[in-house]
Image (spheres, rainbow, N blue to C red):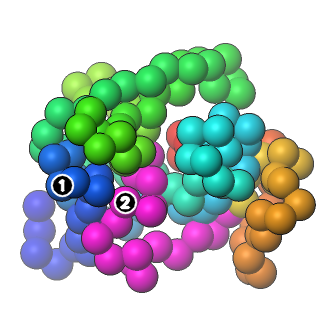
Amino acid sequence: MSDIQKRYAGGCLCGALRYEAVGEPSGTGHCYCADCQKASGSGFIPFMGFPKSAVRFTGASKQFVSKAARGTDAVRNSCPTCASLVFGGVVGKSESFTIYAGSLDDPSLFHPKLAIFASSRPHWAIIPEGLTVFDRMPAARPSQA
C-alpha cells in the first residue's frame, strides 16, 4: 500500500473488528432497499465499495446472509461482541467489499454520489441534493450494498 493513496480506516463500536482501505472507492452512496433499512434500523445504509486488493480486515466478524435483489447472496458482517454492522462481503472469497460509511473513524471522508433503491425509500429518509438517483439497482453495478 502506497503512502500517497487515500486511506480509510474504521471499525465497530468496541474496536474488535477493524478495517483499512486504500485508494478511491469504486462507488459511494446511500442504499434505500428494504433489506438495508432492516439491517441498519434506519432509512438507508451509506456505503463505499472497494476491490478486495484495497481492503484489509482485522478481528472476527459474524456473518448474516440474505438474498440480494439480483438473487445472489448478500453477506453483511457485524462484530460478534458489540453487534455493529461494519462491511459486506466474504473475506477470502469476495472480489469486492462494501464498507458501511457509518463505521469510518473519520466520517468526513465519505462523499456519496449515488442513491440506489430510491423507490423503496421511506418518506422521512431524505436524498441529499446532487446524488444520481436510481429507483432500483443500476445496470452497471456501483457496489454491493
Q: Can residue 54 be seen by looking at this rendering?
A: no
Q: Which residue of the protein is positioned furthest toward the front in this rendering?
A: 82
Distance Cα–Cα, label 1 vs label 2: 10 Å
Q: Residue at x 84, y 54 (%)?
A: 122
Q: Nearer the viewer, mark 1 or mark 2?
A: 1
Q: Residue at x 30, y 23 (%)?
A: 93
Q: Can residue 89 be seen by looking at this rendering?
A: yes
Residue 86 position (above or below residue 88) = below
Quadrant where the C terminus lies? Answer: top right
Q: Which residues are magenta?
A: 97-114
Residue 49 position (above or below residue 25) = above
Q: In this rendered view, identify the residue nearer to me: 50 or 122.
A: 122
Question: Which residue type does callout 2 highlight?
Answer: Ser
Provide the residue designation for mark 2.
103
Q: Residue at x 44, y 24 (%)?
A: 64
Neighbours of disc 1 within 10 Å: few (<14), some (14-19), many (20+): some
Q: Secondary structure at mark 2?
A: helix
Quarter of the image where one finds residue 140: top right
Q: Secondary structure at mark 1?
A: loop
Quarter of the image where one finds residue 89: top left
User: Does 109 lie within the magenta span?
Assistant: yes
- How far across and down, in percent of the image, does residue 74 sit? 53, 26
Provide the residue designation for mark 1.
15
